[in-house]
Image: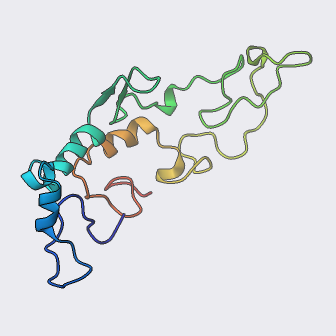
Amino acid sequence: MAEQPQIIVQQPVPPNKKFGARNQTNLQKIFPNSPIHSGELSDQERKEFYEKNVINGTVVGGHGINSFNLDYADAPNFEDVKTGGGGLPSTPFTPNLTSPGPGSMNAADQPVYEGTIVGNTELSSAEFGVGLGGTVSPSVTAKEIAKQSVLGTYIMGRSFATSNG
């Protein structure tokens, strides 16, 4: 994230110099119907619009998706992941490592993986990712991230205040 605030729509007062500075009076005459000049668009209005329509809420009628919750309300819970054979993953973090067998390319023919998974398959393991031990369910982290509703109050190196990664 930028360390210095960026211009959104409201320009700072131009410096008093003959060349190389914007001429606000001329811009207003060139673009008299601009919503920026009328005050309809402002930095605060744009931030509120972004928070309401991009950070929060549900998008309906997206590209190939009927609706999408921006707060990830339906984020998956690793404990609910079904594992086993027949195309199911070996663990919530790894695909089924078995072959469906000679002559088959159908995942439904895969047996349950009986081998040893490298690393700990317990949800407390840090083997499968980073942050919060690498195995915290998105259903947990999404709720915490969704609580961040103020644009610009993000924390360097963390997803949310109580996160360790």
Tell which of 8 and 20 is nearer to you.
20
Q: Which residue is found at the position 76% from the left and 38% from the top?
A: 116
Question: In which quadrant is the C terminus drawn?
Answer: bottom left
Q: Splitting the image into 4 quarters, where does residue 118 fall?
A: top right
Q: Which residue is found at the position 30% from the left and 41% from the top?
A: 54
> Is 82 placed left or right of 23 in the picture?
right
Quick check: can you spot residue 162?
yes
Q: Position of residue 123 (x, y in %)?
A: 54, 40
> Is 145 placed left or right of 94 in the picture?
left
Quick check: can you spot residue 41?
no
Q: Splitting the image into 4 quarters, where does residue 50 fall?
A: top left
Q: Splitting the image into 4 quarters, where does residue 145 fall?
A: top left
Looking at the picture, does residue 96 appear above or below residue 104? below
Tell which of 117 and 19 is nearer to you.
19
Q: How is the image coloured?
A: rainbow
Looking at the picture, does residue 85 appear above or below residue 43? above
Q: How many marks?
A: 0
> Is 133 placed left or right of 27 in the picture?
right
Residue at the outermost left position: 38
Q: Position of residue 16 (x, y in %)?
A: 14, 83
Q: Position of residue 83 (x, y in %)?
A: 63, 24
Q: Which residue is found at the position 33% from the left and 61% from the top?
A: 155
Q: Position of residue 49 (x, y in %)?
A: 20, 43
Q: Which residue is found at the position 15% from the left and 50% from the top?
A: 34
Looking at the picture, does residue 152 appear above or below residue 125? below
